[in-house]
Amino acid sequence: MPMTYYYNKEDLSWNDAPVRGGTVMEKSIVWEGDHDVRSAFFRMPKSMLIPEHDHPRWVQVMVLEGEMEIKTKADESVRISEGGCYFVEPGDVHSELAIKDTLLLVTQAEDRTAFKS
């Protein structure tokens, strides 16, 4: 039977999660393991940098609180503040810097074979 999931900010469960370039962020999983998509909240403290990297599949990042600076070779540097989002195409090399303490909602196509249905 289909089920709806609810996430209030005060009820999120946070864990350390390694991300690109050896950076460790706090992560609270929303969904992964089915439907070929995964989604999670991430916390980035001010000045945290995720060095240049790319993704094999698409990634959408919603800035819920704070402000990010995204650098790509094509677009140089773009700032996205709370309420904004950005979409990264597969293979687009970029870096991300938290200008302020930042809360993100990241949704992406599942790219880990262990989680494929």
Image (cartoon, grey):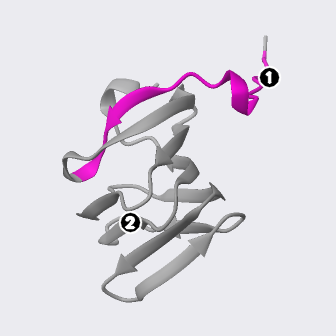
Query: Label 1 belongs to which residue?
Result: 4
Query: Label 2 belongs to which residue?
Result: 96
**Residue lying furthest top:** 1
At 39% from the left edge and 66% from the top edge, which residue is drawn?
Answer: 97
Figure label count: 2
Q: Amino acid at mark 1?
A: Thr
Q: Is residue 60 visible?
A: yes
Looking at the image, is 102 positioned above or below residue 17? below
Q: Amino acid at mark 2?
A: Glu
Q: Earlier in the sequence, mark 2 or mark 1?
A: 1
CA distance separating discs 2 and 1: 32 Å
Please report the bounds of the magenta region as a residue range: 2-20
Q: Helix, strand, or loop for circle 1?
A: loop
At 76% from the left edge and 29% from the top edge, which residue is drawn?
Answer: 8
In the rendered image, residue 100 lying in the magenta stretch gets the answer no
- 31 or 114: nearer the eye? 31
Where's residue 72, x and y in %? 35, 80
Looking at the image, is 14 positioned above or below residue 18? above
Where's residue 68, x and y in %? 50, 68
**Residue lying furthest left:** 22
From the viewer's perspective, tell me whether residue 65 is left or right of residue 25. right
Where's residue 60, x and y in %? 55, 58
- 44 or 114: nearer the eye? 44
Around disc 2, counting alpha carbons within 10 Å, would you say few (fewer than 14), some (14 to 19), or many (20 or more)? Answer: many
Looking at the image, is 85 positioned above or below residue 106? below
At 37% from the left edge and 30% from the top edge, which residue is drawn?
Answer: 16
Q: Helix, strand, or loop for circle 2?
A: strand
User: Which image quarter holds the N terminus?
Assistant: top right
Around disc 1, counting alpha carbons within 10 Å, would you say few (fewer than 14), some (14 to 19), or many (20 or more)? Answer: few
In the rendered image, residue 15 lying in the magenta stretch gets the answer yes
